[in-house]
Amino acid sequence: MKFSIGLAVLIFVAAAGLGLQNSKRLDSLRTEHTSLIASAAKLGISNDPQHPAEVRVTKRVRENHVADAKAVAKDFIAFAKEMEAMHEEAGPPDEFMQKRILDMMDRVMSLDTAGLKILIAEVRATTDLKDEMRQGLIGFSIMTLANDH
């Protein structure tokens, strides 16, 4: 019994030591990175040729999430109109339509919280859909929001 407690304490102390060592190393690397960015800015070096005065820390450019969400909402509403028309005409969706349904669901599920709020607002604002379809789309969007976020 005492051996297992001693072993657990030994493992804890070793892990704490490694964690502290890694934390100190990370702090020193962050300090070095900040000083290198400042030195590069003083020398006029930029990694963005379109905006040479700006020094970006990351390689990724921020996306326009609002425009993306509005585009998804527009496509989502257009797809819902197609589904309404197909449902009124006849039968179940074929294989191609099922693939499109899954693709559209993936696009909706890939939106973040703000994007889903925009999608819900766009669907609520449209008058091109029947109330039943609009409620179904809003319900799906809210379920996605509640499930993922």
Image (spheres, helix red, strand yellow):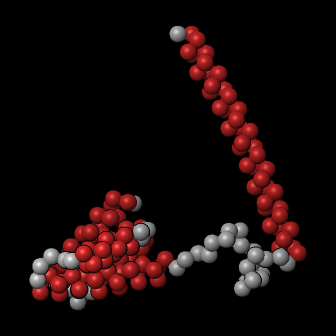
Q: Residue at x 81, y 57 (%)?
A: 32
* Residue at image location 73% in from the left, 79% down from the top: 48
Left or right: 116 in relation to 45: left
Residue 53 against residue 111 in the figure, above or below: below
On the picture, is 16 further left or further right than 106? Answer: right
Q: Residue 76: give x, y in percent of width and height.
A: 32, 80
Residue closest to the eye, 58 or 54: 58
Which residue is outermost to the front?
A: 95
* Residue 130 pos. (x, y %): 17, 84
**Does 76 appear above or below 2?**
below
Q: Nearer the viewer, residue 47 or 125?
A: 47
Q: Is residue 125 visible?
A: no
Tell me where residue 81 sits by quadrant.
bottom left
Q: How many marks?
A: 0
Whether residue 104 is visible: yes
- Residue 79, how many percent across, how many down? 28, 83
Residue beneath the point at 75% across and 43% down: 24
Which residue is located at x 30 percent, y 74 percent? 99
Q: Quadrant of residue 92?
A: bottom left
Q: Is residue 105 left or right of residue 88?
A: right
Residue 26: % across, % down = 73, 49
43 lies left or right of 61: right
Q: Is residue 78 above or below residue 43?
A: below
Looking at the rendered image, the quarter that the C terminus falls into is bottom left
Q: Quadrant of residue 100?
A: bottom left
